[in-house]
Image (cartoon, grey):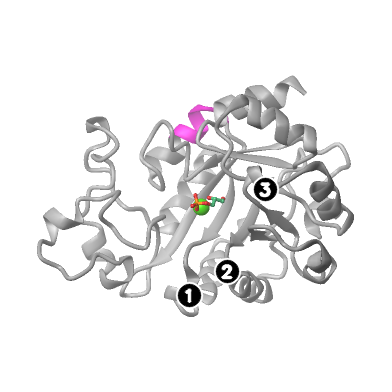
Amino acid sequence: GAVAQNGPPDAPVTDIAHRGASAYAPENTLAAVDAAAQHDATTVEVDVQRSKDGELVLMHDTTLERTTDAEEVFPGEDSYEVDRFTLEELRELDAGSWFGPRFAGEPVPTLQEALDRLRAHDLNLLLEIKSPGRHPGIESDIAREFTRNPEWLAPTRPGGHQRLVIQSFEWDSVRSSHDRLPMVPHGLLGTVPEAELDEYAQWADMVNPNHESVDADYVDSVHDAGMGMFVYTVNDAADMRSALDKGVDGLISDYPDVAREVIAEE
Ligand code: G3P
Ligand code: CA
């Protein structure tokens, strides 16, 4: 896999801001990307989905109610699924007020806007294809987006961090994305059974499980198969230390500042 093979042996552990620095700003917004930069993250994790008219946008939930004012702006809808709204409609939403008045009016960003903001801060990207089963063919749309932004297709950056990793809980989608962007490292979210690691390692570069579900032997097995491992979502410093002791390659955290301090202790 690209992570284990391309990174220097002493590559530093990657500090990944979950949904942006989502402890400090509304998740999956440009404000959360800015907060990741302010808190010295190396990399930002965000979730991508697709609007009714085929635009790629950042959103975690498959519905809009939790993180936007969709019910106020479009009252009486049967459902508020992301893919039932056009980009123009999504742009009417406030994706910040739920988190705090300081973020009122923060829009739902497009993936392109997120890429531009990440570049402005010199941040790397861990992109999760969220619920791809609801967005058939989204892997092609994502591949097209990065083909238009080829600076993201360069491999490992100075310091050993990945410029871009694409991941999903739906492994068929990861495979589909890998086939379209074979130069980009791809990660399988969740836990791949030990017996299947070698098979997946033929094309996948990472296994990215919940931090609670790994022990040191599993981390070793993933590394032995030639793949790297980021764990989610680690917010407690003691849990971060425990994950580092097990040998993980990255910490996905709402608190990238805490992760940075713990990584620096090593
Ligand atoms: O990066 C992995 C992590 O984000 C997966 O969980 O629910 O926050 O998307 P979730
Ligand atoms: Ca995610």
N-terminal of the two: label 1 or label 3? 1
- In the rendered image, residue 28, in percent from the top left (x then y), is placed at 41, 48
Q: Are marks 2 and 1 in contact (CB under 8 Å)?
A: yes
In this picture, residue 139 sits left or right of residue 200: left
Q: Amino acid at mark 3?
A: Ser
Q: CA distance from mark 2 to mark 1?
A: 8 Å
Image: magenta residue range: 35-40
What residue would you read off at disc 2? 170
Q: Mark 1 touching mark 3, by CB under 8 A?
A: no
Q: Residues within 10 Å of mark 3 (few under 14, many from 20)?
A: few
Q: Amino acid at mark 1?
A: Gly
Say which residue appears at 26% left-offset and 33% top-offset. Answer: 100
Q: Mark 3 — residue?
A: 213
Q: Secondary structure at mark 3?
A: helix
Circle number at residue 133: 1
Q: Amino acid at mark 2?
A: Glu
Judged by depth in the image, the label closer to the viewer, 3 or 2, is 3
Mark 2 packing: few (<14 Cα in 10 Å), some, or many (20+)? some
Query: Between marks 3 and 2, how big is the CA–CA gap?
Result: 18 Å
Q: Position of residue 134 (x, y in %)?
A: 42, 74
Q: Is residue 18 left or right of residue 167?
A: left
